[in-house]
Image (spheres, grey):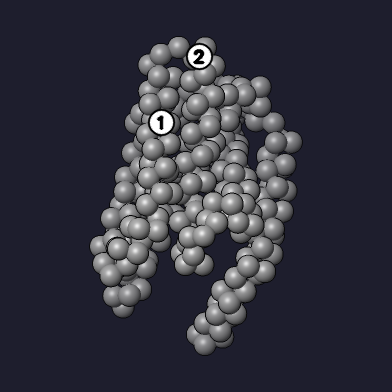
Amino acid sequence: MRELLALFIPAVSVYIYIILSSIEYGVSLFHLFPGILKNARITKHYIQPVFEVTNVFLVFTIVSIFSFFPKANAQLGINLLVPIFLGLLFLGLRNVCMLLIFYGSNERKLINLLFFFSSFITPLLLSTTFIYMLTGQVQNLFFSSLTISLYCFVIVSILLITSAFFQFYAKEKKENIFFQRFVMATIVLFLLSFLSLLMTANITIPYIFSNTVTILIFYL
């Protein structure tokens, strides 16, 4: 029971963080290219410092992992030092750009570009920790075939979650602010990237699938 609880708490926390942060990360694309939206002013409501409370879930996930699995602290701290450090560094850069956009002028193209760049680099760097959790290897952690497939999946997932959120918001406000073609394109790309990730994982780490099937058969 304790083992399941130790896995359940950080899993729920990281799931909430992924959903909420994806909306914030995806807003940077629509802020940089406002032509995608029919009403680009809506992005201003989601580029606010108050929404960065979602980072609490990220901190809680990291603290819970290191608290529930103390024997793995040394291994995780050494092997994941670079991706976590870079991820938090770009997350800080994103927060600085967000403050400049919110309190400054929206006409600063360089700030908008840095905001967009840091918003997508941050989840990509943090997602590499998932590759290490699966493979246990740090060699070629950032540029392996499995990692690149995960990068594509993360980017498309962010766009899909953001577009779905704005589509729901448009229906609530009875406004047609979003192009339907973009929503459909993200759904198609999401399915393709998910299949690509599964195929790459099946080739790179086939034992994951065999163990999963074994566990499912055992419990069924």
Find disc 2 in the rendering and name its residue: 108
Q: Quadrant of the N terminus?
A: bottom left
Q: Residue at x 33, y 39 (%)?
A: 53
Determine the secondary structure under disc 1.
helix
Q: Residue at x 34, y 31 (%)?
A: 50
x, y percent for residue 106: 49, 14
Q: Is residue 190 left or right of residue 49?
A: right
Q: In whole angstroms, how far apart are the C-alphas of marks 1 and 2?
A: 15 Å
Looking at the picture, does residue 192 appear above or below residue 116? below
Q: Is residue 171 left or right of residue 17?
A: right
Say which quarter of the image contains residue 150. Answer: bottom right
Q: Is residue 74 left or right of residue 190?
A: left
x, y percent for residue 91: 41, 37
Looking at the picture, does residue 79 appear above or below residue 53? below
Examine the rendering and report whether any part of residue 211 can be seen. Answer: yes
Say what amino acid the circle numbered 1 marks. Answer: Leu
Find disc 1 in the rendering and name its residue: 93
Please, which residue is most extreme toward the front here? Answer: 139
Say which quarter of the image contains residue 15. Answer: bottom left
Q: Residue at x 49, y 35 (%)?
A: 119
Depth order, front residue of 79/32: 79
x, y percent for residue 96: 38, 26
Say what amino acid the circle numbered 2 marks. Answer: Arg
Looking at the picture, does residue 185 appear above or below residue 103? below
Among numbered discs 1 and 2, the one appearing first in the sequence:
1
